[in-house]
């Protein structure tokens, strides 16, 4: 088995479902330090460790990043190939994270090592993060610590099916909590039904963002109430209820505008409710958009065409990535999302997730070529 396949297999066999990323960080650190590349472990919590590797110097700094965690495998007996066995069949490596996104993480790491070993002396940084699948805590921690403050450009190695993603919507999660007074359902007037304001919110929310202007590139804002919880039994007026929703902000109606609109709506509910309604922001990931004529975009198109014979298709997506956190830095830099593995709508988070090994091997060459073209 070749080294690239062996590394990917080892990463997929390491169960990092919503945690345990320190094990992946240790594997990557081993590979980098064997090549003489300096690394730093940045602990988020016990067993959850980001890794930063760096070489070269200069003001122009190109970084690559990927996340170490994966989503839960679910019912493992439903998988045709065990989710953490990393079995190889007909040129495909199966397992949770094979597509999203341990193949991208491994490919970027191997390209990083190949560049260093070749004597490439431009300024390069590699960042492996914890918790991208739920909260992006690692990217947030590294951004707060200043690791994005000197970047010139950033490649996020998520699976895009070989498309060059130059922009994506944000992702915004919130809760609305309602507090009332519990009484027997035979005497509802003596209590306060915590569910009623949430039902009103649900009706209002259907048209709440109808006037939000669509972004000319990313498109329109999307929103949905996705969770509602209330009550313990049918003959008791509930004294607590909550709902949760997800919104996909766009540059023309951003996260701050979304927060303001939701807070105004909750204030209006409180003004006419006998109970109390609270708004809670859970996660706020920003939209990301890079001009298509940016240096990183054109360099990637040229490099991929050189390696594979075809320039990648330019596209946008409506999923969020760690880029939403890194781009919160006051420093402005160009960002793209580019990787192999099937795209996020078709393969990631599904049973029998896999990556085509030929595409994975191609990605290693492409990431190396992108760096060379970027600094050419």
Image (cartoon, rainbow, N blue to C red):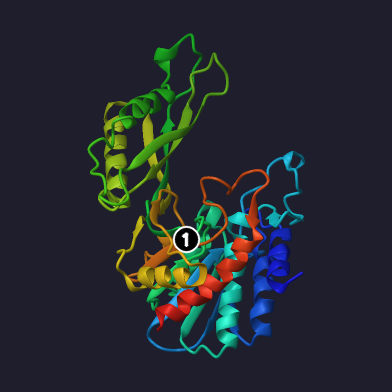
**Residue 219 position within the rendered picture, expressed as x and y whole percent measured from the top left:** 31, 46
What residue would you read off at disc 1?
A: 322
At 57% across and 19% down in the image, what residue appears? 233
At 33% across and 63% down in the image, what residue appears? 290
At 66% across and 83% down in the image, what residue appears? 33
- In the rendered image, the quadrant that contains the C terminus is bottom left
At 42% across and 34% down in the image, what residue appears? 225
Q: Which is more toward the observer, 267 or 287? A: 287
Q: Which is more toward the observer, 12 or 172? A: 12
Whether residue 361 is visible here, answered yes or no, is yes
Residue lying at the far top of the rendered structure: 186
Q: Could you tell me how many numbered marks the image carries?
A: 1
- In the rendered image, the quadrant that contains the N terminus is bottom right
| Residue 211 in which image quadrant | top left
Relative side of 5 to 270, left or right: right
Whether residue 331 is visible here, answered yes or no, is no
Q: Answer above or below: position of 193 versus 349.
A: above
**Residue 156 position within the rendered picture, expressed as x and y whole percent measured from the top left:** 48, 64
């Amino acid at each position: 088995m070749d080294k690239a396949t062996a590394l990917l297999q080892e990463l997929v066999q390491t169960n990092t479902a919503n945690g345990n990323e320190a094990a992946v960080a240790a594997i990557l650190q081993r590979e980098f330090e064997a090549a003489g590349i300096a690394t730093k472990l940045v602990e988020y919590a016990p067993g959850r460790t980001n890794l930063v590797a760096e070489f070269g110097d200069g003001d122009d700094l190109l970084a690559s990043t990927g996340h170490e965690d994966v989503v839960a495998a679910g019912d493992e007996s439903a998988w045709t190939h065990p989710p953490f066995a990393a079995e190889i069949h007909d040129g495909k490596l199966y397992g949770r994270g094979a597509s999203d996104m341990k193949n991208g993480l491994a490919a970027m790491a191997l390209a990083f090592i190949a560049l260093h070993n070749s004597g490439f002396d431009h300024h390069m940084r590699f960042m492996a993060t914890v918790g991208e699948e739920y909260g992006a805590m690692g990217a947030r921690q590294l951004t707060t610590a200043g690791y994005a403050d000197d970047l010139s450009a950033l490649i996020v190695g998520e699976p895009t099916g070989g498309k060059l993603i130059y922009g994506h919507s944000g992702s915004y999660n919130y809760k609305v909590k309602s507090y009332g007074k519990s009484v027997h359902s035979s005497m509802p007037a003596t209590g306060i039904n915590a569910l009623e304001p949430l039902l009103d919110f649900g009706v209002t929310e259907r048209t709440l963002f109808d006037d939000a202007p669509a972004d000319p590139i990313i498109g329109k804002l999307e929103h949905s109430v996705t969770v509602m919880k209330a009550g313990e039994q049918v003959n008791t007026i509930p004294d607590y209820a909550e709902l949760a929703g997800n919104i996909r902000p766009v540059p023309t109606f951003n996260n701050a505008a979304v927060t303001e609109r939701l807070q105004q709506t909750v204030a209006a509910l409180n003004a006419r409710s006998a109970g109390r309604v609270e708004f809670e922001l859970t996660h706020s990931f920003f939209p990301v958009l890079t001009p298509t004529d940016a240096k990183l975009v054109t360099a990637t198109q040229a490099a991929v065409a050189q390696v594979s014979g075809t320039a990648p298709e330019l596209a946008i997506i409506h999923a969020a990535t760690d880029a939403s956190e890194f781009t919160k830095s006051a420093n402005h830099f160009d960002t793209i999302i580019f990787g192999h593995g099937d795209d996020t709508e078709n393969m990631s988070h599904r049973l029998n997730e896999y990556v085509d090994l030929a595409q994975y091997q191609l990605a290693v060459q492409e990431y190396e070529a992108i760096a060379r073209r970027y600094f050419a």
